[in-house]
Image (tube, rainbow, N blue to C red):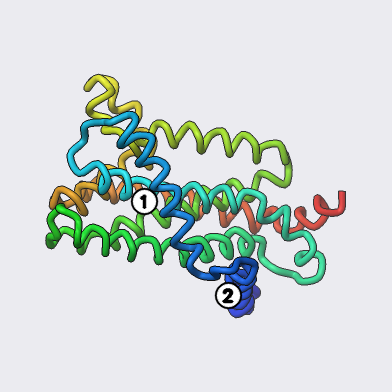
Amino acid sequence: MVFRKTIPLLLFKTSANLRAEVSRYYLNYLWWIIDPVLTMATFYVVFGIFLNRGIPHFVAFLLIGLTAWNWFARSVQHSANSILQGRGLMMQVDIPKIFFPLEIFLRDTFKHLFVVVLLLVFLVFYPTPVSETWVALPVLMIAQAALILSISIICAMVVPFVQDLSFVIGTGIQLMFFGSGIFYRIEDVVLPEHQHILYLNPMAGLLKEYRNVLMYSTWPDWVYIGKIFLVSCLLLVFAVYMLRKLDYIYPRISQQ
């Protein structure tokens, strides 16, 4: 009941924070597109020109990887301190603590959708085939959304107890970045008998499936996607359960 009453507040705060964010910049909403484009351009210059990977259609390969990765990394990093930073609101209103990471997830997902549309427009004009496998893209995004949300809530749940964990989370995301195959093909740099180690990183497998769907006209590995979604949902249920158990503790921590 409390959470049901919180939904209008969640939507209002998400919208308000998005408007407040763009109001600080002269170009407003264009920064949601300019920022990822500049990031992608930097990686292309470094890895596509100076450190040429020799990958066919490398621009599309890189942009697909960065688009999916940035959604994951930014959402998790932004969510990690969300409960801690929400101490002012939780002291005024009895609000489910899942509200804080969920609001950030919705905000980052909304901005991510703009980048996805831009990516698809680019791929239409890029010399990679547009095929029926593109209809699998929403399924991949749903599986990734479940993964992001579960990890984001778990990180937000533990950081208030040990605030230094926010630095550990940042380092962990950096390690995942270099092990996800964003600017290289795992098959090209890792021996076949060791590839399964990198694919324990769920983002490595998801990036591969995104590229199969959008670049290579190949249907994703539905069993793998199903496993990612199932495990993420189980983690999500666990995180929500623990948040409810710890709900009354967070206001006390914020006063310390």
Q: Residue 249: percent from the left, percent from the top?
A: 77, 53
Residue depicted at 14% across the width and 60% down the height:
130
Q: Label 1 amino acid?
A: Leu
Give the x, y percent position of residue 214.
21, 54
Tag in front: 2 or 1: 2
In this view, the residue in front, 217 or 59, is: 59
Residue situated in front as seen by the camera: 146 or 25 = 25
For the N terminus, the quadrant is bottom right
Which residue is most to the right? 256
Q: Please, what is the three-letter code of the amino acid marked with disc 2?
A: Ser
For mark 2, give the secondary structure: helix
Residue identifier under label 2: 15
Give the residue drawn at x 20%, y 44%. 57
Label 1 sits on residue: 230
Q: Quadrant of residue 65?
A: top left
Callout 2: 10 Å neighbours few (<14), some, many (20+)? Answer: some
Q: Is 181 rendered above or below residue 114?
A: above
Percent of width and height locating residue 242: 61, 52
Q: Residues within 10 Å of mark 1 (few under 14, many from 20)?
A: some
Residue drawn at point x = 44 percent, y = 36 percent: 177
Q: Is residue 252 left or right of residue 131?
A: right
Which residue is depicted at the point 46% across and 59% down?
34
Q: Earlier in the sequence, mark 2 or mark 1?
A: 2
